[in-house]
Image (spheres, helix red, strand yellow):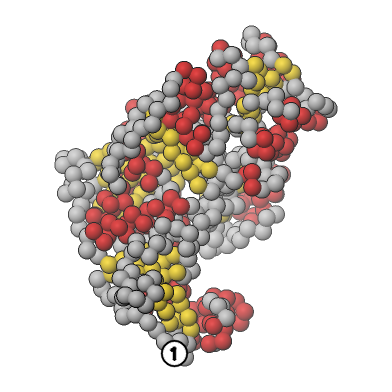
Amino acid sequence: MMEAKKCGLSDSRIAQLTSEEPEAIEKLRQSMGIEASYHFVDTCAGEINAQTPYFYSSWGEIDEGTPTGDEGVIILASGPNRIGQGLEFDTCCTLSSMSLREEGIKTIMINSNPETVSTDFNISDRLYMEPLTAESVKQIMKKEQVKKIIVQLGGQTPLNMVEELEEAGAEVVGTAVENINKAEDRKLFSEAMIKLKLNQPQNKSAYTRDEVAQYSREIGFPVLLRPSFVLGGRSMFIAYSEEELDIFLSKGIPISDDRPVLVDQFLEDAFEYDLDAVSDGENVYIGGIMQHIEAAGIHSGDSACVFPPYKSTPKVLKEMADASVAIAREFQVKGFLNIQFAVKDDVLYILEVNPRASRTVPFLSKTSGVNLIQAAVRLWNGKDLKAQGLVDSKTGVGQGQCQTGWAVKEAVFSFDRFSGLDPVLGPEMKSTGEAIGIGESYGEAFAKVQAAVGCYLPTKGRVFVTVSDKDKQTILPIIKELVEMGFEIAATRGTADFLYKNGIFSEVILKLHQGHPSVVDHMSSGRIDLLINTPLGRNSQIQDEEIRTEAVKRKIPYTTTTSAAQAAVIGIRYLKGETVTSNPLPGSW
């Protein structure tokens, strides 16, 4: 056992190799008296006593450092920065540690990634450079004799181990484990939405491959297939047909009683929204409501979003706010709450509820001027939202407003680092970060954020357009605006024919399979300055993949939805007529 632990094998890996349960291996190891020991990394080179030491684990060696005890709290961070688990969560962890220390509470940060701010040795009282696994956390709990653990700040990773930690004696700070599970378990979540009389897309939980196929047919294509406990929408899939359902089932994704697949009705042509809030169980402060610029079905971490919503009605926005208050109280949320909505034909649907901080918490905190992380820390320490002055004294509800005029969050992608990767977006997250653009107008904010992510909108030149039949009426006024601003239009034959019938003359360019010079040839020669391509369905996405890949290679701005194309036009109009200004962020933190 000691040899295995010194070689870095976890209890779960040893269990896998020996055909045992991880719990049995853990008990056997503990009965042998084999526990992790921890060494200081001396940040002061022995010259003076380090005030903020950090640790790494070893086995069978002398343990250093005295326990922190009951006065400390453990913060579970987000682990490696990768697609689906970005630096936004690290910002939440960093700010929470700073706020806790202001409250006089000792903080213990657990994170495995040295390339983050949360792992700077002066952010927390103690730092453990350890994997984000239940085994590592339980060992540190025992070493530090600390029971309080914050799981809401590091994304999905900490929530996936919350039950095991509670069974080991952890006191989860904020929302109770029972209510976390109620939001995470799709069946319990669905029952709660029915109780609250809130709309949700038709959905069923499938526990076998046959049930996935059966429920997909019953609900009707297209369906959104969501595996359990996924990070960043990994392996989520939109199936438009039986053939595409077979593609999903052939991927070998685990489907069982413990890992069901949610079969969801996919709401095409819907607008999606994100709402972040902080609740103390009764009072609710809504940090803000953001509208996705991309169409429904694109992962929220990939979709550009605008605050405040640029296309909505007061009625729908009030429904969202009322729904968030009802959900926060039903789930007894104490801390963060993220809700994803969809609106189709003026009907509001609840897509997902996350009882944790989302990636947009830092974005909303910056642009609203209210530090949501600090508000959560204060309520965890007994100061409710009324006492903090964030909600109305009678209703117990408050809502943040954008202090910068308009703010747009745009995802950062690394498509140019990977040869031949199709940049089309979907339910599986592909972004590796995000940027903010702010301005007095929506166009100013959008143009700035595009520049921030390296996508410079053109102010003249030629726009290539190829859109699906369902998008042609929507794209028409957008193309007319581009023509009014002096752009030349090029299009594939079908789109060009539609534009001609509506009074717009465009150059006809061949598709890839129609011969040369094709659209890719035109892009290679520098004749295309903006690409508008809206693929519908899997076949269309595959056919247009090379066009989008070439756009990434040539750094040509491109949009894959009509809503993103409209945003680009608004940004271009601003760039052609205004002087770009710099705007200060509200607040001092």
Pointer 1: residues within 10 angstroms few (<14), some, or many (20+)? few
Residue 330 in the image: x percent, y percent?
A: 31, 50
Does residue 498 show up?
no
Query: Between 555 and 569, which is closer to the camera in this rendering?
Result: 555
Please determine whether, in this image, residue 570 is positioned above or below residue 168. above
| Residue lying at the far front of the rendered structure | 47
- Residue that mark 1 sits on: 33
- Closest to the observer: 498 or 116? 116
Q: Nearer the viewer, residue 502 or 365?
A: 365
The residue furthest top is 503
Q: Quadrant of residue 73?
A: bottom left
The amino acid on which the numbered mark 1 sits, given as a three-letter code, is Gly
Residue 236 in view (yes/no): yes
Instruction: Give the x, y percent position of residue 473.
Output: 59, 19
As displayed, is residue 291 above or below residue 517?
below
Quarter of the image with the N terminus in it: bottom right
Residue appearing at x 55%, y 46% in the figure: 431
- Helix, strand, or loop for circle 1? loop
Side of 202 relative to 64 (left or right): right
Q: 495 or 341: nearer the eye?
A: 495
Q: Residue furthest right?
A: 515
Q: At 46% from the left edge and 17% from the top edge, which residue is drawn?
A: 577
Name the spot of residue 208 as percent of width and height, x first.
61, 58
Q: Does residue 498 appear left or right of residue 227 in this picture?
A: right
Identify the residue shown where x is 61% and y is 31%.
558
Residue 182 in the image: x percent, y percent? 39, 56
> Could you tell whether 422 is left or right of 411 in the image?
right
The residue located at (71%, 44%) in the rendering is 420
